[in-house]
Image (cartoon, helix red, strand yellow):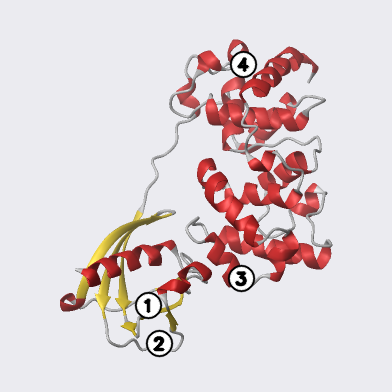
Amino acid sequence: MQQFYFIHQEVFSWFEKNGRHDLPWRQTNNIYYIYLSETMLQQTQVERVKNEYYPQFLEKFPTLKDLAQASLDEVLSAWSGLGYYRRAKNLYACANECLEHFDATLPQEYKTLLTLPGIGKYTASAVCSFGYEQNVVVVDTNIARVIKRFFGLVDAKDALIWQKAQEFLPHTKVKEHNLALMDLGAMVCLPKNPKCAECPLQQWCQGKQNPHIYTQTKKKEYIAMELFFGVWIKNNKIALHYSKDNMYHNMLVLPNVEPIEENFLGSFKHSYTKYKLDVKLYEVEEIYEDDLIWVDVEEFESLPISSLTKKAYKIIRRTNNE
């Protein structure tokens, strides 16, 4: 607030010179574009979203109404490779809710946004701030790190971080302030090697002497899993089915089989969320499943094929060519 006036001016000055103004979702007032970017950026690097998935997705679904009127298979196909497919399903469900109840646009009210599929506290505040330019606080991982170090908050709970972020909010240029803190966290106030000498908050930062104590996290533990997939190829088509497990629900994958060593084709490693997968492929001549779908590889781009399945197909094709 008023006690932070001069600090805010330093932040605005830094942001004007150094902010990531070229990001396409920052050069538009289209609420759908902004909402899509926020959904894609969860668990995905900015450059990958910016250069690949964001423009391709918008080319296929240029409006929220277009997205709602597509099929889930079409949406999952466009999302294929981004991972965390629940995001795509929630995006699709949200679009349908908006088409039915809000004239195919996202509501402006924060509390109403929270009722929509897949929209939590951060996404709702981001849509309100970056899209509707409302004076609301936004806290993502980057902003939280800046706030914790600036105020010296060790082991702080989310509620306290949001409270301090609210206290730090200026009276004007709130959208720019939120974006500036986000960019500071992404470019300067880094988790491991913060560039404190370049930070406009350095003079007032309570955590600059020992910044690493604010980013200590438990080492991520992965669950090791073995997967055994059957490869059944007939008339230049491969047998797939829709996955029913949570990992790739509604995505087309190879069917599971019992391993038979003499039919072994190859193996590969794959990581997905908390899983470290050891995937093994076996050639089969028949699979007893009712829901098999025969897919020509040329159709892969138009179907919801998981990245795991695409990686498996590369192994299969290489093996067949040897």
- On the image, numbered disc 3 is attached to which residue? 72
Q: Amino acid at mark 2?
A: Glu
The amino acid marked with disc number 4 is Pro
Q: Is residue 127 above or below residue 74?
A: above
Q: CA distance from mark 1 to mark 3?
A: 21 Å
> Image quadrant of residue 192?
top left
The residue that disc 4 covers is: 200
Q: To which residue does mark 1 refer?
A: 255
Asked whether disc 4 touches disc 3, contact meaning CB atoms under 8 Å apart, the reply is: no
Gap between marks 1 and 2 measured at Cα: 9 Å
* Left or right: 321 as drawn, with respect to 296: left
Quadrant (top left, top right, bottom left, bottom right) of the C terminus: bottom left
Q: CA distance from mark 4 to mark 2?
A: 62 Å
Q: Can you give x and y, in whole percent of width and height, for residue 22 in the image?
A: 63, 35
- Nearest-to-viewer mark from 1 and 3: 3
Q: Residues within 10 Å of mark 2 (few under 14, many from 20)?
A: few
Binning the other alpha carbons within 10 Å of mark 4 as few (below 14), some (14 to 19) or many (20 upward) gives: many
Whether tag 1 and tag 3 are in contact, CB under 8 A, the answer is: no
x, y percent for residue 205: 59, 16
For mark 1, does the 10 Å Cα neighbourhood hold few (<14), some (14 to 19), or many (20 or more) residues? many
* Residue at numbered disc 2: 289
Compare marks 3 and 2 and give the one earlier in the sequence.
3
Disc 2 is placed on an element classified as loop
Q: Is residue 160 visible?
A: no
